[in-house]
Amino acid sequence: QVQLVESGGGLVQAGGSLRLSCAASGRTFSTYAMAWFRQAPGKEREFVAGISRNGNIVSDSMKGRFTISRDNAKNTVYLQMNSLKPEDTAVYSCAADRRMSTDRNEYHYWGQGTQVTVSS
């Protein structure tokens, strides 16, 4: 069982930056693939970025602005978001599972989400 808790969301102006954190429970964190998804009002949850032992992936629409990283000693995964745009406004959730995927249905463990609001 893995429990995930996100933090770091908030209100930021367009062009600004935020760093989201996702703290995980458990002693086997390093063996899990971790990912960030986001869901804007009225839209489906979409893949943002993922990281595993084999590397990381960032969605094409966010590449160059968003970076995912992890600190296995702290059981934490991060999402650094730069050059934020109003369309980045969403609830951001982290997810964990044994294999990395861009498909939200492949993840068994989810955090509660953190709101990111980007004002124009």
Image (cartoon, rainbow, N blue to C red):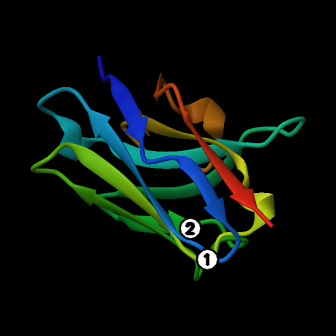
Q: Whole-percent x and y of residue 11? A: 61, 52
Circle 2 Cα neighbour tier, 10 Å, few/some/many (<14 / 14–19 / ≥20): many
- Reply above or below: 71 against 103: below
Which residue occupies 73% across, 39% down?
Answer: 45
Q: Where on the picture, by quarter, is residue 86? A: bottom right
- Reply above or below: 102 against 64: above
Front-lying residue, 118 or 72? 118
Mark 1 residue type: Lys
On the image, numbered disc 2 is attached to which residue?
Answer: 58
Q: Secondary structure at mark 1?
A: loop
Give residue 63's mark: 1
In what quadrant of the picture does the N terminus appear?
Answer: top left
- Reply above or below: 2 against 28: above
- Reply above or below: 26 against 100: above
Mark 2 residue type: Val
Q: Whole-percent x and y of residue 66? A: 54, 70
Front-lying residue, 15 or 77? 15
Q: Residue furthest top?
A: 1
Label 1 and label 2: CA atoms lie apart by 6 Å
Front-lying residue, 107 or 19? 19
Which residue occupies 52% across, 70% down?
Answer: 17
